[in-house]
């Protein structure tokens, strides 16, 4: 093992080992060499080399998404750090823990024309839980410090004063590191540690020269005592439980069964909720969108709106349910769980800081009452399902048809990662295999890192990964394939309609040259050469029969990862999707 002679670098590595932050994603550079070599030479860490920092950020996010523990990101100074920003903002709003460690130039070399320097302190501003800068070691190349304009760091150049000053700095750095690491663990969000290094950077020791001041361990977040007088103001005859992005097991089977027996409680679950029960309602847009087109929409929505809204999990994909609950607000909104209580529906959310299982386990008898509420939703769902099957059976090959074919043909062994924009919204219109898990970067809902996230998730999981992605997201993040960590079981299904087809169905879109070039961004790219370059087995289809045939062997064992490119017509796909929602109102 190699321990950096720079004490601040060594201290960071030793604390990462102490905290059990074992996954480290490193991007190339020289200023970060003390950290990179220190981590990579230590068998306690699983180190991954990712060249593109933007991809590295999402790769690390994918690891933490599955492991539920912070992943460490290490980069050099300058613009390298800025490339983490998309992944950091996604992690912040998705509540996924990351430890970003950026090497920096010494303070006296910032903004004087020295190479590869920017203002790195607090560069992520509000889109991060905490950001700190460590003190520069003064016992490392002290002569360089004395040459600078910051000679006051050392009140006297004597060896005794340097050692005294270093001891003070070391104490400060340790307390700062411990504090910020604990925050990442407790609140499941990204934190940033910026650390200035003076050259030389490549001096190492065989054994540690720093002795950590361990100190007391931080206690875990305390759960609130459940006083239902604070949450449940009365007996509610209409209760809607809305479940957003969640990890599997957010509700136990016992609690799910108890909720399912309540006639006044309905559960609307997103595809990303990873929650399944025959009495719960998925395909939210399919249920609600047709009502928006009815003349008596307000009357119908008033009948469907809950008196009490209970939310669980993270971000909500469906714009339809957001619009409905904002325009027809519940009397009360309770968010249950430790994650952020977003006031998504403008009705003063109350945060119950307790586990959903505990909440429902203790509240279910008080919540339950006789009501026709669930029966109303069941009737709507039954009509929609019957129409959906009939409509799908008659349409030609298009994006909607593709997802209908995928619905029953994805191997249950696979964990699914879905890109944003069209892909996740189409997924919301179909049932998924109950044993499958579905994840999507919904914190900021960008298309910029879906592939990298999926590859990162795959190194954390024993089960194989399937990425379902649109063309813009895939080509945008093509560097997500530029690494050595893609398993032979990794699969990509790319729906390529040669542009941002989702924009065609949005209000205000015009079918002209300006919208086509600058909004939809039409292109003629194929993934064939990218697949070959990165060692994927490639196949392409453009029809229902070909897709069904390709899927019959797509998930079988192979020596290489596989990429299936599905070509569809953007104009036809958007037209059929519009007709789908228009005709649903007849059901």
Image (spheres, rainbow, N blue to C red):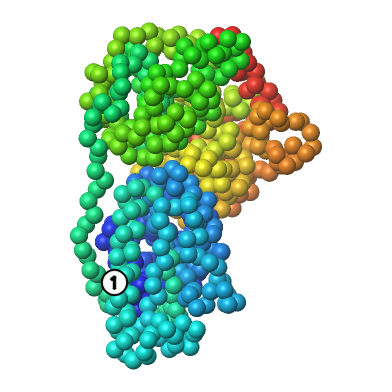
Give me the residue at 29% from left, 89% from top. Answer: 160
Q: Is residue 62 above or below residue 466?
A: below
Quarter of the picture containing the N terminus is bottom left
Q: Position of residue 153 (x, y in %)?
A: 40, 81
Quarter of the picture containing the C terminus is top right
Count of numbered labels shown in the rendering: 1
Name the image quarter holding residue 66: top left
Most extreme residue toward the bottom, as rendered? 158
Q: Nearer the viewer, residue 372 or 212?
A: 372
Q: Position of residue 71 (x, y in %)?
A: 38, 54
Residue 124 visible in the picture = yes
Q: Is residue 319 above or below residue 6?
A: above
Give me the residue at 47% from left, 29% from top. Answer: 345
For label 1, the SS is helix
Residue 52 visible in the picture = no
Could you classify mark 1 by the number of other residues whose Cα lies within 10 Å: few (under 14), some (14-19), or many (20 or more)?
few
Q: Is residue 337 above or below residue 177?
A: above
Q: Nearer the viewer, residue 479 or 321?
A: 321
Instruction: Report whether 83 appears left or right of 240.
Output: right
Give me the residue at 22% from left, 51% from top. Answer: 219
Look at mark 1 in the image and give the residue it sits on.
171
Instruction: Report whether 506 appears left or right of 95.
Output: right
Most extreme residue toward the left, as rendered? 216
Q: Position of residue 222 (x, y in %)?
A: 24, 43
Name the image quarter holding residue 519: top right
Q: Is residue 536 above or below residue 388?
A: below
Q: Position of residue 54 (x, y in %)?
A: 53, 55
Give me the residue at 41% from left, 21% from top. Answer: 331
């Amino acid at each position: 093992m190699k321990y950096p002679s720079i004490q601040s670098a060594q201290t960071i590595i030793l604390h990462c080992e102490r905290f059990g932050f074992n996954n480290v994603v490193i991007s190339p550079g020289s200023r970060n060499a003390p950290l990179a070599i220190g981590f990579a030479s230590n068998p306690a860490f699983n180190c991954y080399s990712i060249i593109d920092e933007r991809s590295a950020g999402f790769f690390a996010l994918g690891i933490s998404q599955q492991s539920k523990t912070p992943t460490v990101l290490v980069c050099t100074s300058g613009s390298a750090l800025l490339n983490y920003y998309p992944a950091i903002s996604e992690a912040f709003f998705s509540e996924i823990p990351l430890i970003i460690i950026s090497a920096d130039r010494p303070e006296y070399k910032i903004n004087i024309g020295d190479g590869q320097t920017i203002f790195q302190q607090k560069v992520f501003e509000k889109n991060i839980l905490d950001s700190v800068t460590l003190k520069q070691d003064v016992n490392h190349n002290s002569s360089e410090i004395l040459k600078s304009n910051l000679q006051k760091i050392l009140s006297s150049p004597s060896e005794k004063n340097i050692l005294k000053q270093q001891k003070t700095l070391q104490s400060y750095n340790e307390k700062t590191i411990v504090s910020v690491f604990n925050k990442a663990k407790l609140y499941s969000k990204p934190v940033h540690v910026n650390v200035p290094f003076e050259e030389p950077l490549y001096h190492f020791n065989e054994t540690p020269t720093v002795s950590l001041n361990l100190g007391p361990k931080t206690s875990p977040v305390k759960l609130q005592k459940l006083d239902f007088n604070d949450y449940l103001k009365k007996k509610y005859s209409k209760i809607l439980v809305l479940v957003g992005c969640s990890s599997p097991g957010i509700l136990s089977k016992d609690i799910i069964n108890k909720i399912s027996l309540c006639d006044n409680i309905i559960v609307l679950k997103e595809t990303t909720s990873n929650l399944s029960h025959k009495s719960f309602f998925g395909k939210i847009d399919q249920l609600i969108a047709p009502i928006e087109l009815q003349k008596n929409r307000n009357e119908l929505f008033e009948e469907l709106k809950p008196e009490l809204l209970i939310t669980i999990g993270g971000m909500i994909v469906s714009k339809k349910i957001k619009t409905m609950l904002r325009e027809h607000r519940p009397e009360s909104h309770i968010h249950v769980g430790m994650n952020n209580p977003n006031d998504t529906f403008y009705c003063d959310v109350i945060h119950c800081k307790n586990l959903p299982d505990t909440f429902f386990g203790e509240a279910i008898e008080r919540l339950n009452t006789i009501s026709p509420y669930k029966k109303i939703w069941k009737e709507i769902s039954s009509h929609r399902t019957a129409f959906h099957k009939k409509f799908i059976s008659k349409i030609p090959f298009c994006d909607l048809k593709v997802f209908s074919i995928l619905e029953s043909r994805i191997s249950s062994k696979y964990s699914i990662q879905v890109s944003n924009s069209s892909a996740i919204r189409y997924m919301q219109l179909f049932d998924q295999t109950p044993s499958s898990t579905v994840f999507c970067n919904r914190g900021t809902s960008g298309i910029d890192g879906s592939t990298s996230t999926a590859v990162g998730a795959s190194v954390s999981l024993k089960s194989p990964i399937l990425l379902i992605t649109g063309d813009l997201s895939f080509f945008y993040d093509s560097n997500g394939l530029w690494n050595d960590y893609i398993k032979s079981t990794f699969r990509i299904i790319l729906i390529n309609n040669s542009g941002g087809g989702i924009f065609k169905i949005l209000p205000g879109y015009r079918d002209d040259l300006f919208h086509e070039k600058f909004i939809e961004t039409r292109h003629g790219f194929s993934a064939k050469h990218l697949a070959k370059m990165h060692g994927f087995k490639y196949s392409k289809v453009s029809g229902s029969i070909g897709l069904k045939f390709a899927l019959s062997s797509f998930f079988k064992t192979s020596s290489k990862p596989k990429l299936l490119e599905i070509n569809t017509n953007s104009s036809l796909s958007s037209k059929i999707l519009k007709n789908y929602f228009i005709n649903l109102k007849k059901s």
